[in-house]
Amino acid sequence: MDKDRGKRLAAEEAAKHVERGMTLGLGTGSTAAHFVDIIGARVAEGWPLKGVPTSEATRRQAESLGVEIIEPHETTVIDLAVDGADEADPQHNLIKGGGAALLREKVVAYAAKKFIVIADKSKRVTALGAFPLPVEISPYGWALTVAAMRRTLVEQGFQNAKLELRSIDGNSVKTDGGNLIIDCSLERINDPARLEKALNAIPGVLECGLFCGMTDMIIYGDEDGVSVSTL
Ligand SMILES: O=C(CO)[C@H](O)[C@H](O)COP(=O)(O)O
């Protein structure tokens, strides 16, 4: 399957929901990058559009395409947010954070009047959990926070959970906000909303990569076209 063509087609379908004058939440990752490209092309055609980026990488891309950037603290209105996902289930629960931008992505998606997820069809699953769940935590006392997360996961029935500080070449990955990512290898997640709430209740956890009850529409693409899921 040509995943990149699926991502592009999904982004093109999402762009049909963009109207002149909108303030857009711009997601992070290879699928969201297609959407940002399309927004850049619209701006070049003269459309008045503004973008709230969810990462420094997206900010650089949008700026290079001439999209006017709005800082998240400069607005209380986001008309439409479009972002990718690592996994999505039929109830529109998501795992996000593979690109280490989940806190900013969730702030923007939550604020948006409408949140559309775009993904190649490989991201569609019957139940979440094969993709390790990213959790963004504060660097302060991070080992204490990880120990608390481990206890919570056991309480939630994940006796075999494996928690790993995300690192590259021996260096811990820092998010754009200077935070750490803990990747939690779990088995099937039967109640994502319950797990999201339990993890987010731990001091030091800034956000967990489960996005439950936030997604209005998921557009899946593959080489043949798109399918649109609404609840
Ligand atoms: O959550 C994310 C970044 O934090 C991305 O949306 C997610 O990882 C999907 O990325 P891609 O579109 O490259 O597969």
Image (cartoon, rainbow, N blue to C red):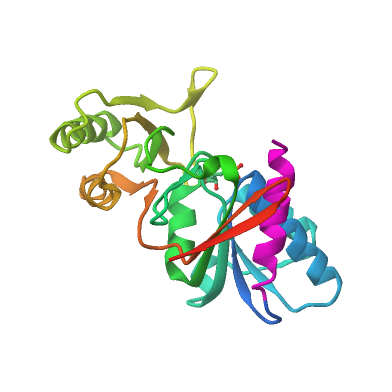
Q: Is residue 108 above or below residue 102?
A: below
Q: Quadrant of residue 162?
A: top left
Task: Tell me residue 30's x, y (percent).
Answer: 66, 44
Of 178 and 224, nearer the camera is: 224
Q: Quadrant of ligand 1?
A: top right
* Prevailing SS of the magenta stretch: helix
Task: Tell me residue 202's x, y (percent).
Answer: 21, 45
Q: Residue at x 65, y 51 (%)?
A: 221
Left or right placement of residue 55 versus residue 183 in this view: right
Q: Residue at x 73, y 45 (%)?
A: 223
Segment tinted magenta in the rendering: 1-18
Residue 60 in sight in this render: no
Hey, which residue is sitting farthest bottom in the picture? 21
Task: Tell me residue 10's x, y (percent).
Answer: 66, 56
Task: Tell me residue 27's x, y (percent).
Answer: 58, 55
Q: How many discs appear?
A: 0
